[in-house]
Image (cartoon, rainbow, N blue to C red):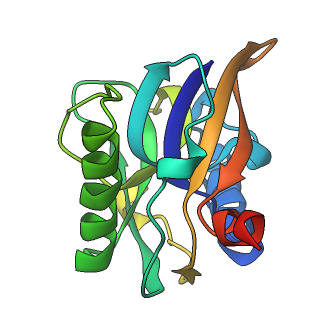
Amino acid sequence: MRLFVGIQPTEAFLNALCLLQDRLREAGVSGRYIDRHDLHMTLAFIGEWPENISEILPDVRKPFKIALSHLAVFPGSDVLCARTQPCEALDNTAKSVRHSLSDAGIPFDRKAFSPHITLVRKARLPDHADLAGLEIPRVAMTVHTIALYRSDRGKRGMEYTVIDTSDRKEDQKS
């Protein structure tokens, strides 16, 4: 299985991300837009691992808020993403996930955590595109849980499926 740990956006956050994608299309940005059900924020990319590792997912001890901030091109790529406002609790959650993986001996991509949600891959921006002037929806969401995702190659690229969440561990103990 190809796995990663991330944050699943709420319905309101998804609506705002899709609105942002619509605004990008209207601005003439082309590329491979990420489907609504595949939008997420990666906390740690694991890659190929033979088993479900949800039992090691740390709980979100104290829920926290993340909010959309701005658009950016992911450094050294043609990936257009939505960035979130700085959030110490988000950074600490990513660290906690990575420590849990490390303690369990599960290898993961050790690139520095860079909070973002990919909106468009292979993005091509027209010369006249003014992304700085594009209105970013004012939306925030409270993060209560983190998710273990499986990624599979589909007809239109990678498709992501939540296979477990940190809050379901408590349900399974009862």
Work out whether residue 28 or residue 138 is closer to the camera in this orientation and state it.
138
Q: From this viewpoint, which residue is outermost toward the front?
A: 174
Q: In this view, does 139 lie to the left or right of 78?
A: right
- Residue 41 visible to an observer of this rendering: no
* 99 to 174, vertically: above or below: above
Work out whether residue 122 or residue 46 is closer to the camera in this orientation and state it.
46
Residue at 59%, 62% in the rendered image: 166
Work out whether residue 136 or residue 5 is closer to the camera in this orientation and state it.
5
* 42 to 124, vertically: above or below: below
- Residue 156 visible to an observer of this rendering: yes
* 35 to 51, vertically: above or below: below
Q: In this view, does 144 lie to the left or right of 100?
A: right
Count every numbered label the image shows and give the total: 0
Q: Indicate the position of residue 16 as horizontal and vertical percent values.
A: 66, 70
Q: In this view, does 127 lie to the left or right of 145?
A: left
Q: Indicate the position of residue 108 as horizontal and vertical percent values.
A: 32, 29
Work out whether residue 34 or residue 125 is closer to the camera in this orientation and state it.
34
Residue at 56%, 36% in the rendered image: 120
Quadrant position of residue 23: bottom right
Q: In which quarter of the image is the N terminus?
A: top right
Residue at 43%, 85% in the rendered image: 64
Residue at 70%, 50% in the rendered image: 164
